[in-house]
Amino acid sequence: MAILIIAEHDNCTLKGATLNTVTAAAQMGQDLHLLVAGSNCQNVADEAASVEGISKVLLADNSVYAHHLAENTAQLISQLGTAYSHILAPATSNGKNILPRVAALLDVGQISDITAVESADTFQRPIYAGNAIATLQSLDNIKVITVRGTAFEAASTGNDAPIENVDLQIESNLSSFVSEEIAQSDRPELTAAKVVISGGRGMGNSENFTLLEQVADKLGGAVGASRAAVDAGFVPNDIQVGQTGKIVAPDLYIAVGISGAIQHLAGMKDSKIIVAINKDEEAPIFSVADYGLVADLFEAVPELEQKL
Amino acid sequence: MKILVAVKRVIDYNAKVRVKADNSNVDLSNTKMAINPFCEIAVEEAIRLKEAGSAQEVVAVSVGPKACQEQIRAALALGADRGIQVETDDNLESLNVAKLLAQVVRDEQPDLIIMGKQAIDSDNNQTGQMLSALLNMPQGTFASEINLQEGEVQVIREIDGGLQTLGLTLPAIITTDLRLNEPRYASLPNIMKAKRKPLAVVTPETLGVELKQHSKLLKVTPPAERSAGILVSSVDELIEKLKNQAKVI
């Protein structure tokens, strides 16, 4: 049986997390179908058709799917899903919102946020903020899974898979879209950036995050934050790195004024190189850092920015 | 309006997690347990709605062994009116918890159900969404603001890249994100008062819910350890190492 992958997109472009999910799916089976559910999203379907390993793109282009409302989209996926052995989505806010609803509609469990595929029914996933790794075997006939993007390489492109239209219009009338505020930024997406520089409570206030933005811009990176910085109101929650925020694994992660609580480490400890800048030499962040600099961040960060 | 909040007993977020030597699971013996932080936010939000006059009753429900009555009492001490424990000693999967909660909802008929977006032990982030599916109710996940209006609730949601506002018909299910509110501390008089608030105990059998196993835990292992690197003495040395040794800039 084939595997159904839910494409992550904004009706304009296919999001990178989809490509990592395709790689995970390819380790479970051969026949991979990619579902693009949205509105006026032909461009996304065309991009989806170019992903290597995909044998078919399913396009459900209808205004009822425009805002990825869980009530409509989950119903669509569960109706299509009965023909599949696996249903996969990236563990993005969208995937996390919709896929458990799909699983319950199909009366099967969900395995969340997998980081390794051992076989078509056995997977690894972190639990307890990444302090333990569970190996789970699914007993369901349809396996519903969300995939941690940073744990799998991105699939390449260059394919030309056929696109098939899905004529299913499902409207629950239970929820309606009111508005959306998406931060506009020229910096790369946090979860896809090669370099991430994050600030913690030590940053002191939101204005000081400008210091990090300047370094990020020099390195072509993204800016993140610890939960402490979000709780203190310095920055919005969507840049929170950690157990309950974003999971990142860039080539270079620079932690500035972050003590290194386990909840934060859960979101970044798979980074290739970790740098910690903190004036407290006892901070636990130094125990995971490849390079530690014990210094006042208000001196070290501007100096770093200037010398890069 | 009646609000149902679900609370889960989990390891205290400051406690250290140990994997058992036989890799069968984590070792929770003698570990400090607490109410899941996101569930605490759910309780706080329900109580604020009651204090604002929008809700008349707040019911706290927990699925778990007898010990989870501690967490229900904690919710009662924060201001919930009564508790329901669905007693089970099994470590249930999300779908089974959702099925038990669905039956409680059918019995209690609340207008709003508030629960945490994820528990910090299993980190699944599933139960609220599954409950919504089972009851065919709208879901407002990862909420950072809730506004009750005539016949509906508006929810501001934390999504990748920003915020989304949805309107949900009632009854609805909301899962909390961390910016929704800052939970209060229970006062000593309220902790004492909570001991006398009603707490009903039901079981999967009395609820008439059949549970099914969906996955098998094969093993639990510690994560790959990351060893500490070196301390550098200056920004210049840091840049030199990143360029020439790590080759990441």
Image (cartoon, rainbow, N blue to C red):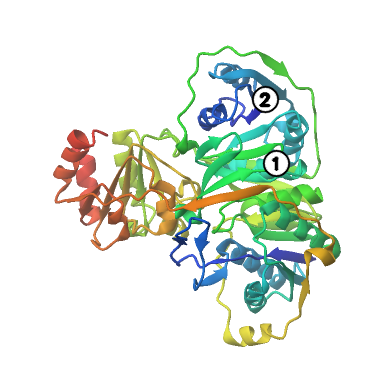
Secondary structure of the residue carrying numbered label 2: loop
Q: Which mark is residue A2?
A: 2
Nearest to the observer: residue A164 or residue B172: A164
In the displayed structure, B188 sits above or below A90; it is: below
Q: Position of residue A299 (x, y in %)?
A: 20, 52
In which chain is the residue bearing label 2? A
The amino acid at mark 1 is Asp
In the displayed structure, B38 sits above or below A266; it is: below
Hey, which quadrant is residue A27 in on the image?
top right
Mark 2: give few (<14), some (14-19) or many (20+) Cα within 10 Å: some
Q: Is residue A194 visible?
A: yes
Q: Which mark is residue A140?
A: 1
Nearest to the observer: residue B119 or residue B1: B119
The amino acid at mark 2 is Ala
Q: Position of residue B170 (x, y in %)?
A: 80, 54
In which chain is the residue bearing label 1? A
